[in-house]
Amino acid sequence: MEGSKIENRKPFNWIMIALLIVFTVVSIFTGVNDLSIRNVFSLTDTQRLILLTTRLPRTISLILAGSTLAISGLLMQQLTQNKFVSPTTAGTLASARLGIVTAIIFFSHSSLTQKTVLAFIFSLIGTFTFILFVRSVKIKNAVMIPLVGLMFGNIVNSLSTYLAVQYEVVQNTSSWLQGNFSLISSTNYQLLFLSVPLLFLIYLLAYYFTIMGLGKDVSIELGVPYGLLELAGVTIVALATSAIILTVGSIPFVGIVVPNLISLKKGDHFGKILFPTAGFGALFLLVTDVLSRTLIFPYEIPISVVIGVVGSVLFLYLLLRGESK
């Protein structure tokens, strides 16, 4: 019986890998400028410049951001033992934005590294504030937790908007409020590579994170340093989220929708769904980005708008599904 389950999983994995390859190629060759896969070996200098400076960096950014957001959501769900918690519903993204707005207002000449540090500190504080609040209130209904997180995120976003208006930096901060890959080039996407060692670290600690899903008491009995690993997990999520929001802006719903869809198909074992979640997160962003570039071609819709529509529908489906259980 177990052997048949493994065989059933293999087609899903291969199908996802095939789709990931297909949409990677589609992403590279989708755009206003004439660039076709048929003449990839006979590109002009202009076409080669477009390929190397915009198309490849954008596609790589989509893959890195999608996999990182999906894994971050999966990790937060594991730490909080709640399927509806993610950087979107825990105030992590909103807190990182507040950190960026603060950096622009009070440290206008700060470097990208300094902005990253400040965004990381704010997102870390915001995430822990949410976790501590949820635990102190002890909400019994699991569906209420993400709703509380969304309200918390909206409060933080309102504060960010108020500060931006008061200090007249709305134009400077608008790029952080809406996710968009159209401005990605070979000169401004390197920060996303920070997610690679962070994802590798999550993989190394996957066994311990899996045990943490059993609960705090059981984890401590099994010799797992629960508090230290919880701090490590939230720190990884905060740092990864800060890198993404500084590079491409806010991307909603990926961290909550993708892990839940994968767990419906492959179960809840953290270690076993780690790679499928990363792959599907990358695929999800690639598909939605292609849609954002083609729906009103030759114009482009910000990817956060497309994901907001698709993600909200899937999120409502998951909420209703959770309510019915």
Image (cartoon, rainbow, N blue to C red):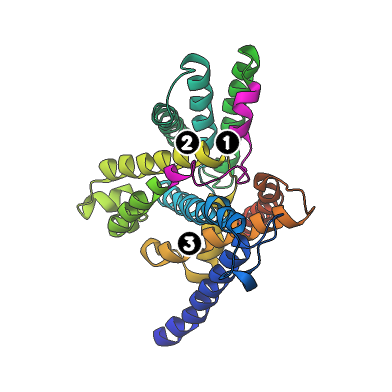
Using the rendered image of the protein, determine whether residue 325 is visible from the camera's viewpoint. no
Q: Which residue is mark 3?
A: 277
Q: Position of residue 119 (x, y in %)?
A: 45, 30
Q: CA distance from mark 1 to mark 3?
A: 25 Å
Callout 2: SS? helix
In the image, taking residue 10 as reference, residue 286 lies left or right, namely right
Is the residue under label 1 in contact with that under label 2 (CB below 8 Å)?
A: yes
Q: Which residue is depicted at the point 58% across and 69% down? A: 40
Can you tell which of label 1 and label 3 is closer to the viewer?
Answer: 3
Residue furthest right as drawn? 296
> Which quadrant, please, contains the C terminus?
bottom right
Residue at mark 2 to residue at mark 3: CA–CA distance: 26 Å
Residue 13 vertical placement versus 296 (above, below): below
Residue topped by disc 1 = 148
Going by the numbered disc 3, the residue's amino acid type is Thr
Give the residue displayed 37% in from the left and 43% down from the top.
236
Q: Quadrant of the N terminus?
A: bottom left
Q: Is residue 236 magenta?
A: no
Task: For residue 153, say whether it is visible.
Answer: yes
